[in-house]
Amino acid sequence: MANKNYSWVEKYRPENLSEISAQTNVVKSLKSALTTKNIPHLIFFGPSGCGKTSTILALSKELFGSEHYADRIIELNASDERGINVIREKIKTYAKQSVKNIKDAPPWKIIILDEADTMTSDSQFALRRIMEQYSKITRFCIICNYHNKIIDPIISRCSLFRFKPVDSDEIIGKLKYICACEKFHCPDKLLDKIVGICRGDLRKAINLLQKCYNSYGDKVNEELLDEMSGVIPQEKFKKLMDHVLNKEITQVDATVNGLFLEGYSMVNQVIAFHDYVVNLDLPSDKKSNILCKIADIDQNLIKGCDEYIQFMKLVYHIMVTI
């Protein structure tokens, strides 16, 4: 059995651009940089777990060689280091450091700024000046979920690459490859369920697969997967929605309380409510009303609102609307 403490996400991270799952257009564009040995500043944007960091690391390994790439890459998480002083001191210091010549490698280094959409406007304006001053010896790769949160002067200095959620077939292919390497028998039905839970997030899918392997090995089944994923089992969810549709207030309160006490996070249930409502036999105006409320509640949860209150708010809104 493989070392259980070793992260499969890191173990199976692509070593070169050809191994990147999906993102065909992005990979095709970046491969030309391998022949010219030159790239502009880059902005990679898209949802979590779709290969943004893996792509720049794979590109760097091919540009600089696996022995030297660690010396030419600096990774910073902008959400931790987002103040203007950090930009002026730490990043500026890195950016102006010269690099030693390596045969057949470009004469510059790459600074990777992850989660850059959390940076303050002041620090982004400071970064813009650094990008201009030291472009001969430093290229920036800015990684974010939403490029509209990056200021226009930075966007105009960069090449933008949009990363799409990874297709289900690509995720299943990667999970099957990992299962074969780890000698882990995971039925296709469970792999399909993992893909459904992860919604295009390959990293989340690999982590969930490893969790199944570490916790239960070949004994894993759908019930255990539901428990680990934090998604309410179909049977319990249907029971809750039956009470909601029948407007049985006492049972709805008791069921929501029970689910909350069992530790089910509302964040993980948003997609289940969405899919259920889409398939309900309701007039379009009522459906759209409920779906708009689900979107509002999803936004509230992201902002850190109380999950129990949001859970109650949603089920009672559905009850009133139908």
Image: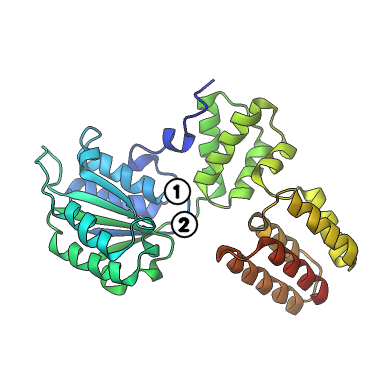
- On the image, which quarter does residue 189 sit in? top right
Disc ID at residue 22: 1
Q: Is residue 288 above or below residue 30?
A: below
> Percent from the top left, x then y, of residue 286?
76, 77
Q: Residue at x 13, y 39 (%)?
A: 104
Residue 268 in sight from this viewpoint: yes
Outermost residue, front direction?
A: 85
Is 61 on the left or on the right of 144, as rendered? left
Say which element carries label 2. loop
The residue carrying pointer 1 sits among few (fewer than 14), some (14 to 19) or many (20 or more) residues within 10 Å by Cα, namely some
Q: Identify residue type, mark 2.
A: Lys
Q: Is residue 136 above or below residue 21?
A: below
Residue 156 in sight from this viewpoint: no
Q: Residue at x 33, y 71 (%)?
A: 121
> Percent from the top left, x then y, of residue 73?
25, 45
Mark 1 touches mark 2? (CB < 8 Å): yes
Residue at the spot of label 2:
164
> Percent from the top left, x then y, of residue 255?
83, 56
First-in-chain label (1 vs 2) = 1
Is 260 on the left or on the right of 104, as rendered? right
Q: Residue at x 77, y 66 (%)?
A: 315
Q: Residue at x 63, y 69 (%)?
A: 295
Q: Is residue 201 or residue 263 the one in the foreground?
A: 263
Q: Report how far apart the C-alphas of labels 1 and 2 lie in the structure.
A: 8 Å
Q: Identify residue type, mark 1.
A: Ala
Outermost residue, bottom direction?
A: 285
